[in-house]
Image (cartoon, helix red, strand yellow):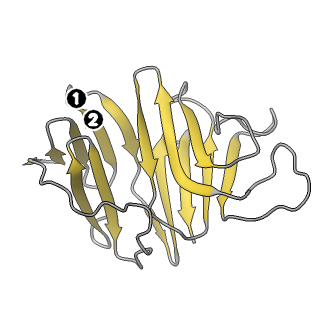
Amino acid sequence: MFEQAELEICFLTPDLVQIDWKPGVRPVPYGIVHQEWSEVKTTLEKDERSVVSSSALKVVVTTNGSLEFQNANGQTIRQELPPLDQGEKWVHQAQLRLEERIYDLGERATSLDLRRPKSKKQQVAAYRMWNSDKPGKYGSGIDPLYLCIPTYLGLYQGGSYLVFYENSYLATFSFLLGGWSISTHCSVSFH
């Protein structure tokens, strides 16, 4: 994985981390106004995997590029698969728990829990990130609407996390259903 990619991990606060995968054309930064961050004391441990830690958060990096975010007690908050470089398109994937609920992405004409598919036959709920002005009436399932924000809150029995993509490119967010496995994940592709 790291033969073709570089990972930058920057702790902005002890419990807020910025992740940046390279190479690629960086999107224009637009969402994070605050640029002057105090230095956060971190430690680095390296063996078969690398662990970058602050007083509140650990980021575990494996040799294939997957990431695991843990709290100070070592409990897993979030697991991410290595990003996929598909030419002009990047795909970011994270595993989801069976009971995990996903909220936000801006204005949506759907249920609050974005992981709930539009019909019982579907196994995936997908959302486009591209603001549009839908004239007239619209009903449930019309997507996208006026205000798309590439951020979501994952809420599960043991905790929560917030993910924000500072990326203004056209994107698709897909939330698959199922158990705690590689087939049950969030997939985000930017074009």
Residue furthest to the right: 136
Identify which residue, 2 or 79, lies in the foreground.
Answer: 79
On the rendered image, what quadrant is the N terminus found in?
A: bottom left
Q: In the picture, residue 179 is in which quadrant?
A: top right
Which residue is nearer to you in this view: 4 or 131? 131
Q: Disc 1 marks which residue?
A: 74
Residue type at numbered disc 1: Gly
- The answer to whether 38 is drawn above or below residue 30 in the figure is above
Specify few, some or many for label 2: CA neighbours under 10 Å numbering under 14, 14-19, or 20 or more. some
Q: Is residue 18 above or below residue 59?
A: below
Q: Helix or strand or loop: what does disc 2 sit on?
A: strand
Q: Is residue 110 left or right of residue 56?
A: right
Residue 38 placement (x, y as % from top left): 15, 54
Quarter-of-image position of residue 4: bottom left
Is 40 left, or right, of 113 in this rendering?
left
User: Which mark is on residue 70?
Assistant: 2
